[in-house]
Image (cartoon, grey):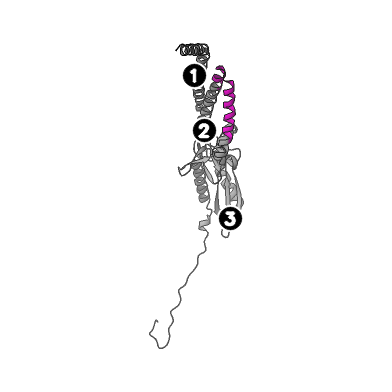
Amino acid sequence: MEFILESLRADWQSFLSFSPRLIYAIVLLLIFWFAGSAAGKVIGRVLRASEKTRTTMGFVQRLVTWVIRFAGVLLALGVMGFQGVAASVLATGGILAIVLGFAFKEIGENLLAGIFLVFSRPFEMGDLIKTGDLTGTVKALDIRSVHIRTADACDVYVPNAQIFKQELYNYTRDGLRRPDFTIGIAYHDKPEQVVALLEGTVRRVPDVLPDPQAFVSINSFADSHIEYQVFFYLDTDSSKRDFVTLKNDVMINCWRALNEAGMTFSTDVTTALDVNSVPVFYIEGLDKGT
């Protein structure tokens, strides 16, 4: 019995001598735990302030939070005298990362690709991008995928690695876009007059940028008409109208100008054919008209 009491006293003394470190480690862990949450919220507010950086807000917020918390765990282990354990955690984490990297290669690729996309920032929220055969507006960037909404209101989640490996077209990086459309005009309308009329009409449309200037190119000589291609520029950041509305306005104004000038559109260039019916013939011995 005396032996048990002596053992308990020794353990209690050991606990009392170790308790300051334990309390300090717990306090340190709690500080880093809540500091990680606070830092994540601050990062979230900063990124939320700009509409363009909202794309990466969730990804960066979670990354910062867990990095700080993990650092707190390692420091707490060190304060308690478990430097070897802390080193083992780092080593185990490295080994575990390698094992998981082989076991979940796709997840690891998407995670790393997401980190590279966050720091390289080839697109922002609201940008119109094209990757592969998919074209749409960026809605969010997560740890695994990029949320893209297509023109037909379909939400597509593209793996980060797929976007990182393929060519990425960003149509709204600086707000500058160049719409175009084609129109066919008859051969008897002089090409130089058609080009001058179209260019002058497009440049007078509000929200069409004066620089770079709109221009018209003769695209091809078809069987019944000349095909013209009209190019113009707009700034989606400053324009009062969206891409589709402005393009429609430009096309309507071009149609009106050509129509008022009496020019012939390709659909009006037709050949009138005089189709005569086969004449009635008669054969002797049969009824008339057969």
Residue to which mark 3 is pinned: 226
290 left or right of 195 in image: left
Q: Of residues 184 and 153, which is closer to you in this image?
A: 153
In this rendering, the label closer to the viewer, 2 or 1: 1
Percent of width and height locating residue 129: 54, 40
How crowded pointer 2 is (Cα within 10 Å; few <14, some 14-19, many 20+) is rated as: many
Q: Contact, CB < 8 Å: mark 2 with mark 1?
A: no
Q: Quadrant of the C terminus?
A: bottom left
Whole-angstrom CA distance, mark 2 to mark 1, is 30 Å
Q: Of residues 91 and 284, which is closer to you in this image?
A: 91
Percent of width and height locating residue 135: 52, 43
Q: Of residues 279 and 182, which is closer to you in this image?
A: 182
Q: Which residues are magenta?
A: 74-98
User: Is 94 colored magenta in this rendering?
Assistant: yes
Percent of width and height locating residue 147: 50, 38
Whole-angstrom CA distance, mark 2 to mark 3, is 46 Å
